[in-house]
Amino acid sequence: MNDTVMKGFNGSERCPRDMQAAHLVFPAIYTVVFFMGILLNTLALWVFIHIPSSSTFIVYLKNTLVADLIMTLMLPFKILSDARLGPWQLRAFVCRFSAVVFYETMYVGITLLGLIAFDRFLKIIRPFGKFFVQKPAFAKVVSTLIWLFLFFLSLPNMILSNKEATPAAKVWLSGIVDADLHLLAKMYKGVVMLCRCATSSNTTIRL
């Protein structure tokens, strides 16, 4: 069995990590998620094409749908890489490009979910009010800025990882993905805090 021994900070060995699950179980789960995601996102895309962008909610949802669809299309590369079915060049491509796009679209979706929560909060406290942030034009501008900001934020991951692809470079490139996961955790906490603030404010207003 392919085991990897994890070491503590003091150099002592901790329980070994079984890599068999990462090579077999996770790719199988990702495969199911991929086919379900393609089916549902394609159906949702067909529905939203026929819906005009007449509200901020629809604009944010459409952008979230595009982000989810792009993220789903990156899954096959991750499946083949984790299952060790492709050459090492494929894993280098995943670290350099597809993983960067995957996490970028994930960040876009998380940010848009926060904006959707904020938009719903405004609809509750001011159902008949029309702030400038509740106009579809504002939502389109903000969505475009989010895409551009996160694109340029993730662009250094591609530029700084333009070393010659070698098997030894995989370890260095995997550190980029770890940094992405750390940023993802921070963004997720920010969205959770925003939703909690919106919920608590709504409760206070009703009381």
Image (spheres, rainbow, N blue to C red):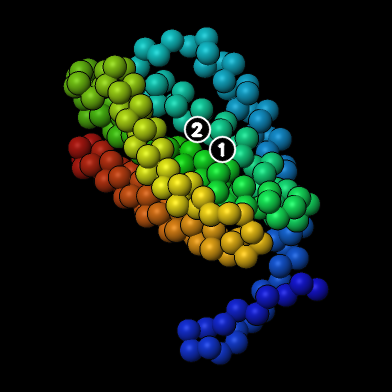
In x, y percent, where is residue 60? 40, 26
Given the image, on which type of amino acid does mark 1 rest?
Met
- Left or right: 114, with 27 as reference point: left
Query: Where's the N terminus, which quadrant?
Result: bottom right
Q: Is residue 59 above or below residue 154?
A: above
Q: CA distance from mark 1 to mark 2?
A: 6 Å
Q: Quadrant of residue 33?
A: top right
Q: Residue at x 62, y 47 (%)?
A: 93
Mark 1 burial class by Cα count in 10 Å: few <14, some 14-19, many 20+: many
Which residue is at 43% across, 10% downward? 52
In the rendered image, which quarter is residue 7 located in?
Answer: bottom right
Q: Position of residue 127 (x, y in %)?
A: 25, 22
Circle on res. 29: none
Residue ID for mark 1: 71
The residue beneath circle 2 is 67
Q: Nearer the viewer, residue 87 or 125?
A: 87
Does residue 107 appear in this view?
no
Secondary element at tag 1: helix
Q: Position of residue 131 (x, y in %)?
A: 19, 22
- For mark 2, does the 10 Å Cα neighbourhood hold few (<14), some (14 to 19), or many (20 or more) residues? many
Q: Which residue is pictured at 20% across the width and 37% down the height? A: 205
Is the C-beta separation of discs 1 and 2 under 8 Å?
yes
Where residue 198 appears, as percent x and y from the top left, is 28, 41
At label 2, the amino acid type is: Ala
Asked if one can make out residue 3 in the rendered structure from this viewpoint, the answer is yes
Q: Is residue 136 above or below residue 184?
A: above
Q: Quadrant of the C terminus?
A: top left
Residue at 52 percent across and 83 percent down: it is 8
Q: Residue furthest right?
A: 1
